[in-house]
Image (cartoon, grey):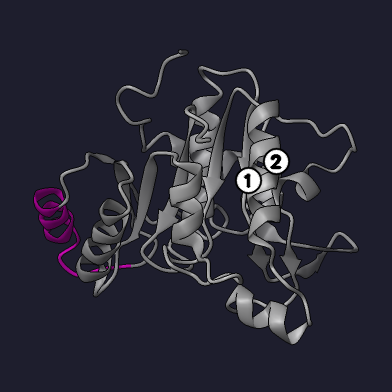
Amino acid sequence: MPYKLGFFVTGTDTEVGKTLVSGALILKLQEHYDCVGAYKPVVAGLEEINGQLQNEDLMTLSMASTYLSDAGNASEEICPYLLGTPAAPHLVATAQNLHLSYEVMLDGYKKMAKKTDAMIVEGVGGFKVPFHDGKDSADFAKDIGLPVVLVIGMKLGCINHALLTVEAIEQRGLQLAGWVANCSIEMQLLNENIDTLKTLIQAPLLGVIPNLNQAEIKTPYSKEALLKAASFIQLPTGFSTRA
């Protein structure tokens, strides 16, 4: 059963700013809801931070969220599968002789949804990253049923990547609530590309995040970086007030 208050954040590719936008949207939702949670079905890539193996995406989501775990470790509830190698999750899991249970992913989402007033679910890589059980990230988005926010990494080829992703979202009967242009690298004809996307994508442009400085884009993101990103975007119309 879909949880009505929140968004599924996907991207045109990996490393396009999904976590930055997810964290910023969490902060935006906190303007309207007391307990805003975060969830991600799987992460791939751990590194030693502060003497512990951690994932930067989960550190950002956990920091931004106002959900406090009864067990004292929100990251374990935010994501059921933490894989060490930064690669396609199904390949890493297979190499580690680990099965990514789709039901475990869905159950984790449902549990978090029951404990929070609103939530942001961040996808994995692009929209159709494979899991096990013949499922992928697009299936997960369809099954939880949240409106989708698409993060478009503004770079050469982004128009094609964006339109294919929009098509895949709409084919599954999902609502594309809006899209964010993340300008993390220098791009020729940037404004013209954004104008083209505004013409071709029927969903609203929620904001344009400029190329932030190196200190601001250092991951895991700081609260200040998320607040700055949040200042450039808005929540989709119709989802920004308490139900």
Point out which mark residue 238 bears: none
In front: 98, or 212? 98
Q: Amino acid at mark 1?
A: Tyr
| Residue with the most extreme bottom position | 95
Q: Taking 114 as reference, is 146 above or below it?
A: below
Say which label, 1 or 2, has the lower sequence index.
1
Q: Secondary structure at mark 2?
A: helix
Q: CA distance from mark 1 to mark 2?
A: 12 Å
178 with respect to 18 (left or right): left
Mark 1 element type: strand
Q: Position of residue 142 (x, y in %)?
A: 43, 50
User: Is residue 187 within the magenta segment?
Assistant: yes
Q: Residues within 10 Å of mark 1 (few under 14, many from 20)?
A: many
Q: How many marks?
A: 2
Please state which of residues 172 and 123 is positioned toward the viewer in this rendering.
Answer: 172
Find residue 14 and report its horizontal and vertical position in percent. Answer: 47, 68
Q: Which residues are magenta?
A: 186-200
Q: Name which residue lies at 65% across and 26% down.
A: 116
x and y percentages locating residue 81 in the rendered image: 73, 61
Crowding around mark 2 (Cα neighbors within 10 Å: few <14, some 14 to 19, many 20+) is: some
Q: Is residue 13 left or right of residue 194?
A: right
The x, y position of residue 96, in whole percent, is: 78, 82
Residue located 51% across and 43% down the image: 144
Kindly tell me whether residue 179 is visible in this rendering. yes
Whether residue 124 is in magenta: the answer is no
- Give the label, 1 or 2, closer to the camera: 1
Q: Which residue type carries mark 2?
A: Met
Residue at the spot of label 2: 63
Image-quadrant location for residue 54: bottom right
Question: Could you say which disc has been placed on residue 39 in the image?
Answer: 1
Q: Quadrant of residue 13?
A: bottom left
Helix, strand or loop: magenta stretch: helix
